[in-house]
Image (cartoon, rainbow, N blue to C red):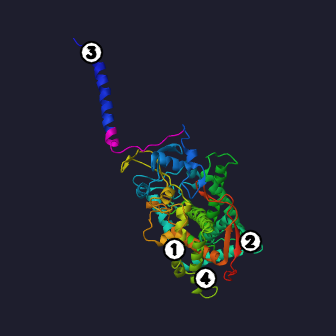
């Protein structure tokens, strides 16, 4: 007679063994040819976040990525921003991640950004809501970029900025100047606020606080960067809300482009305020940084500066004295485009993006588990020596060569590709036009762009200026 307890025990152990075997087969099915990338998960809780965020010059990969890539390869696992993470320094995988944004890898920005940006921010919303809000930004940009009113407005703001520089002091803190310029362009064109109005100053101050909050700890305690950022967003929202209300009453406030946004059906006031903030935010920080990067890099690249100056002199020679630039002139700024492309490749305004895998994904022989954070590192592709010869060197002439790789993604890619790229380029090109025609410059101190992880010039990018003696550009 067989002991029933022995049958139960045997069945239990057989069950366990079967479960183990099935699990193992299942695991091998996923893992035999495809593997979770190598890497290290770092410390409990903080993982490797501090090492990943450690500042370094933005035209380099930084120690963390260099060491990890050489130890584990271009794609590795880590623990960042509180989640197990796959970090990709591989251009092909980055492209795949960005192009499959909706289905496989939705945006996954840290919680601190949700509270500051608000629930309708384009970077944070998904699906139909994302499409609706994004289309509004796209119509704003299309209605703007080649409109002669906008182009003239941009140029006048360039001139007023450059003419405000004290001719007796031959120094300027360029980073601050670039910030004033880019915010003024958006305030004037979108909200019809003039640079000299006190409201412009107020908005700039709120914006500074708003932006500082993005890389802060989410501690809602008075005095913290986070607290100030949340408060700044509320103030900015109420200023924009007031302008919208006045505009609806038929008051002549707000620029024509606010009309473009207000004319869209099915947008709540909260969504409109959020779109205006998106455009101000998107257009301000990044454009300022690219302009400053160009000035920084050109300071050490006299051949490129000479070629750029020639291009703008040629454009000026075709125009009547004092005549403002138009879209045709912009289209002739070909070398200027090379300079912009190269500064974005070398300077890496946006080092990496935040995504999450919503399902188990296999790419070539790489496995990305469902629920893991995924960080495509854009700078890694830009500085990859297998894609770009002398990849760390700022050389705008490389873009004249058809064989130069086009594998860059400074504006991201896929369904979230930056909608403001063309606008930013026009603003930068027009500023460079008057800068190179009016001035030569030297970078005063050693003040390289630092990835914090967003680019910063900690010394404010002080320039020693020398006027070239050009007369165009008196206050119009
Ligand atoms: C040279 C300057 C700029 C750079 C380097 C830049 C870079 C980027 C990048 C990399 C993204 C993708 C974010 C992601 O996929 O998670 C993005 C998105 C965005 N950018 Fe820009 N940007 C610039 C200028 C502008 C301007 C002038 C605007 C104003 C209209 C703007 C508005 C936006 C918005 C609203 C998004 C979110 C798009 C979405 O989620 O669908 N950007 N930008």
CB of mark 1 near ligand 1 (< 8 Å): no
Circles 1 and 4 in contact, beta carbons < 8 Å:
no
Residue carrying label 2: 170
Q: Residue at x 67, y 75 (%)?
A: 439
Residue 420 horizontal/vertical position (percent): 52, 67
User: Is the residue marked by circle 3 packed among few (<14), some (14-19), or many (20+) residues within 10 Å?
Assistant: few
Q: Residue at x 65, y 67 (%)?
A: 178
Residue 53 horizontal/vertical position (percent): 57, 49
Q: Residue furthest top?
A: 1
Question: Mark 3 and mark 4: span between their CA atoms?
Answer: 97 Å
Q: Residue at x 58, y 54 (%)?
A: 453
Circles 2 and 1 in contact, beta carbons < 8 Å:
no
Looking at the rendering, the stretch of residues picked out in magenta corresponds to 27-42
Residue carrying label 3: 4
Classify residue 2 as left or right of residue 211: left
Above or below residue 382? Residue 169 is below
Is any atom of residue 338 visible in this view?
yes
Residue 143: mark: 1
Local secondary structure at mark 1:
helix
Q: Nearer the viewer, mark 2 or mark 4?
A: 2
Local secondary structure at mark 4:
loop
Residue 324: mark: 4
Prevailing secondary structure class for the magenta stretch in the rendered image: loop
Circles 3 and 4 in contact, beta carbons < 8 Å:
no
């Amino acid at each position: 007679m067989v002991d029933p307890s022995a049958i139960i025990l045997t069945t239990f152990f057989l069950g366990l063994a079967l479960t183990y075997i099935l699990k193992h087969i299942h695991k091998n099915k996923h893992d035999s040819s495809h593997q979770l990338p190598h890497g290290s998960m770092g410390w409990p809780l903080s993982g490797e976040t501090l090492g990943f965020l450690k500042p370094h010059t933005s035209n380099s990969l930084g120690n963390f990525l260099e060491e990890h890539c050489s130890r584990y390869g271009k794609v590795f696992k880590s623990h960042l921003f509180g989640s197990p993470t796959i970090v990709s320094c591989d251009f092909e995988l980055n492209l795949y991640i960005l192009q499959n944004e909706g289905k496989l890898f939705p945006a996954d920005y840290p919680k601190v950004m949700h509270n500051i940006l608000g629930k309708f921010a384009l970077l944070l919303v998904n699906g139909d809501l994302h499409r609706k809000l994004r289309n509004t930004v796209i119509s704003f940009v299309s209605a703007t970029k080649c409109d002669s009113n906008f182009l003239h407005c941009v140029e006048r703001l360039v001139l007023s900025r450059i003419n405000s520089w004290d001719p007796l002091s031959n120094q300027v803190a360029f980073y601050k100047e670039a910030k004033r310029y880019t915010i003024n362009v958006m305030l004037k064109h979108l909200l019809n606020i003039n640079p000299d109005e006190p409201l412009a100053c107020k908005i700039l101050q709120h914006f500074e606080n708003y932006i500082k909050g993005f890389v802060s700890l989410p501690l809602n305690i008075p005095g913290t960067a986070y607290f100030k950022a949340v408060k700044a967003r509320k103030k900015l929202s109420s200023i924009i809300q007031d302008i919208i209300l006045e505009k609806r009453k038929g008051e002549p406030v707000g620029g024509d482009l606010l009309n473009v946004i207000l004319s869209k059906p099915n947008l709540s006031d909260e969504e409109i305020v959020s779109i205006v903030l998106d455009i101000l935010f998107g257009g301000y920080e990044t454009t300022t940084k690219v302009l400053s990067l160009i000035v920084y890099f050109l300071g050490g690249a006299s051949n490129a500066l000479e070629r750029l100056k020639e291009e703008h002199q040629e454009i000026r020679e075709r125009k009547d004295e004092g005549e403002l630039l138009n879209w045709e002139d912009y289209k002739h700024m070909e070398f200027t485009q090379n300079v912009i492309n190269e500064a974005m490749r070398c300077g890496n305004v946006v080092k990496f993006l935040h995504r999450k895998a919503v399902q188990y994904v296999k790419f070539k022989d790489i496995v990305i588990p469902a629920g893991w954070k995924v960080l495509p590192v854009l700078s890694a592709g830009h500085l990859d020596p297998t894609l770009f010869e002398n990849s760390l060197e700022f050389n705008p002439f490389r873009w004249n060569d058809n064989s130069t790789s086009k594998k860059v993604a400074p504006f991201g890619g896929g369904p979230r590709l930056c909608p403001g790229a063309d606008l930013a380029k026009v603003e930068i090109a027009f500023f460079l036009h008057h800068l190179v025609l009016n001035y030569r410059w030297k970078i005063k101190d050693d003040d390289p762009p630092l990835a914090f992880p967003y680019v910063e010039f900690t010394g404010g990018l002080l320039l020693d200026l020398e006027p070239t003696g050009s007369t165009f550009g008196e206050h119009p």
